[in-house]
Image (cartoon, rainbow, N blue to C red):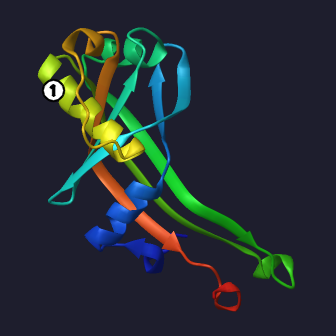
Amino acid sequence: MRRADREVHDTAEIEGILRDCADVRVAYQDAQGLTIVPVNFAYVLENDKLTLFMHSALAGRKIDAIRSAGNALPVAFEMDCDAEVYTGRTPCSSTTAFRSIIGTGVAGLIDETGKKIEALTLLIRQRTGMKDVKLQPRRVGKVAVWRIASTEFTAKRHPAPAMHQD
């Protein structure tokens, strides 16, 4: 059953979920079958469009899949934070509080050095808090940088039950 009452539409609240989630799980299908991989990410949320940025090794299953798909690999993604189980008096009254974002999109490699530097700088700033990041083009060439342009996503929250809130 879809729980529309848990959907988050407020941009500031969606950004809070994006900021607080440590990683995103990306699912895709390739020649080997279905797989899912957790990765660190940065994000840009503009005009209700979400773009995620990741980095990885230059070679491997993810990169092969993106290239095999003509730099347009269909993916699904999920991130969650603040998950906590609350036990009720009965099993049916137990619940889990959480905040999450689930969506679909298209993954593609970023090949241009300047764009790779922008994405990696954003990732470092958002994940480490380091503000004055200076990346060398020769070093950036040693990693793959890719993005997911979301085609749709839903943010949800399920707060702690009233009897467990402060």
Whether residue 73 is visible to the viewer of this picture, yes or no, is yes
Please, which residue is most extreme toward the bottom here? 163
Query: SS class of the residue under badge 1?
Result: helix
Which quadrant of the rendered structure holds the C terminus?
bottom right
**In percent of the image, x 30 and y 23: which residue is there?**
145
Question: At 39% from the left edge and 35% from the top edge, which residue is drawn?
Answer: 75
Q: Residue at x 27, y 16 (%)?
A: 140
Q: Position of residue 19 (x, y in %)?
A: 39, 56
Residue 56 falls in image quadrant: top left
Q: Position of residue 66 (x, y in %)?
A: 34, 19
103 w.r.t. 163: above or below:
above
Look at the picture and state if 75 lies above or below 2.
Answer: above
In the shown orientation, is residue 104 left or right of residue 23? Answer: left
x and y, in percent, of residue 70 in the image: 25, 16
Report the quarter where the N terminus lies.
Answer: bottom right
Classify mark 1: residues with Cα within 10 Å, few (<14), some (14-19) or many (20+). Answer: few
| Residue under pointer 1 | 115
| Lateral position of residue 21 relative to residue 153, left or right | right
Q: Viewed as shown, does residue 65 lie left or right of 95?
A: left
Residue located 45% across and 30% down the image: 28
Q: Is residue 125 above or below residue 145?
A: below
